[in-house]
Each structure stands twice: as structure tokens, then as C-alpha cells.
Image: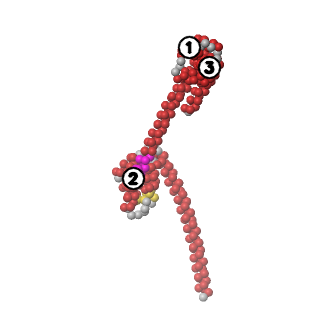
Amino acid sequence: TMSYVALFLLLIVFMFSIPLVRLVGQNPVWRDHAEITQLFGNIPRAIFGLLQMVINPDTDTMRIIFEEQPWTAPFFLLFVGMTTFTTMSIIVGSVTDSYKSLSDAERERQGLAEKERREKVRHRLLRDLRAADKAEVGLSGALTVPAFTHQLRSPHFQEALRLLGVQPSNVEELLMLLEVDGHVYYEEFVNALGLMGQGAQATQVLWLKAHVAEESKRLEKRIEGVEGRLVSMAASLDEGFSSIRAELRRASASK
């Protein structure tokens, strides 16, 4: 954006320098005024002179030109107004861009620091839950609901939940959602805690509900398919045993 504004400023200076050279710098009226002819005698000099007016307007020179050529008054006023507005846009844009860059960098730094802090809390929870899993006899990677509840009520677990910004009510609901046959897989539980934050707890709980419901439906379909195959296999086995018994009866009768 800043480059476009600077280019626009140079374009304004160039556009105003062309008529200024033709109507002022090369005008016979100023033949005896070396200062005017040197300042606006050709386009490069006119561009340099106009840039000087942008930085530090020379009212004495403009007043001299106004006295001989009154029509140049609105010309210079329009030029000063346009270039002043453009210069202010450059200054304000530069300050705004700098502030935005600093703000984005600070926000990114804070976001990385917050993410790192949450990851440390989650790793500490996983370490404690793995230690509890080793002390418990049973399924690896999961704790029974009473053992998990005991860990959940411990002071360090409550402190970790506070640092993660998760409400206890949401934790209890999450525990019920992830319970499978009286066990809770703690890695899945801690990963779900990482998704839940101060601003999105309700949304994440609803997402987890939908996810669990979808997985439950998928498991039910798989169980139904397995049951159907087992029934088919049992029927085939019954038919086979019936055929064997019939053959044995015929063999016995023939003897």
C-alpha cells in the first residue's frame, strides 16, 4: 500500500510539472527572472522544485508567480492540497503498518506461548495418568472410571484443568462421553481437553457428542454385520451337522 501511495505522489508531481514548464518556466514573462527559469525551466528541474514544495512549501516563490500570472494561484493550491493529503497518507500508513506488524508479531508470540503452555500441561497430565495406569492391573492405555475419577479429583489435576480453562462440568460430561465398558482411554481424554478452551467449550462438547454418536452408529453397524455373518455361519454349520447325522443314520441302517 505504501509503495502505491508513493507512486501516486510521484505521478502527481510529474503531471503538474509538465504544464508548469510550458506555461511558467518557458514563458517570456520570466526571461529576466533567473530563479524562476532555473526552478521550472525543464521537467527534471520542475519535478525537483515541486518536490521541494511538498517537503517545505516556498511561499515567496509562489507569491512572485501569483503577481505575474494570477491563474497559477489555484494551480499551486490544488497541487499543495493533493500532495499534502498524499504525504499525510504516507505518514499515517507507515505508522499504521508498523503498529499492525508489531501487533501481529506480539499476538503470534502470545499464541505460541499459550500453545506451548497448554502442551506442557497436557504432557504433565499424560505422565501422571500413565503412572496410574502402570499401577493398575487391567487394560493398557485406559483406566477404570473409579481410578480415573480419583485422578480427576486430585489437586494437580484440578490445577491443570484451571490452566487449560476447562470447566469441571464439561470435564464430567466429557468423561461420560468417552467411557467405554467402564474404562476411559486417558490419551483420548487429554487430547479432547486440549481442544476445549475458554471460548469454545460448548461448541467442542457438542462436537464430541456428535463424534461419539457417529462412532457409536458405525460400531453398531459393524456389530450387526458380524452378528449376521455369525448367524449365517451357524446356519451353515447346522446344515452340515444335519447332513452328517443323516449320512451316519443311513450308514447304520444299511449295516
Q: Residue at x 53, y 56 (%)?
A: 217
Q: Residue at x 52, y 23 (%)?
A: 55
Quadrant (top left, top right, bottom left, bottom right) of the N terminus: top right
Q: Compared with residue 170, is residue 134 higher up or lower down, i.e. above or below?
A: below
Q: Circle 3 sits on which residue?
A: 41
Q: Residue at x 49, y 36 (%)?
A: 101
Residue 124 is tagged as 2
Which percent across, then down, holds residue 195? 46, 49
**Which residue range is magenta in the image?**
115-123
Quadrant (top left, top right, bottom left, bottom right) of the C terminus: bottom right
Tag count = 3
Report the mark closest to the observer, 1 or 3.
3
Which percent across, then down, holds residue 130? 40, 58
Local secondary structure at mark 2: helix
In the image, 77 versus 149, the foreground residue is 77
Q: Circle 1 sits on which residue?
A: 63
Which percent across, then down, holds residue 193? 44, 50
Report the mark closest to the observer, 1 or 2.
1
Amino acid on which the number 1 mark rests in the picture = Arg
Amino acid on which the number 3 mark rests in the picture = Gly
Amino acid on which the number 2 mark rests in the picture = Arg
In the image, 60 versus 190, the foreground residue is 60
Distance CA(mark 2)–CA(mark 3): 78 Å
Most prominent secondary structure in the magenta stretch?
Answer: helix
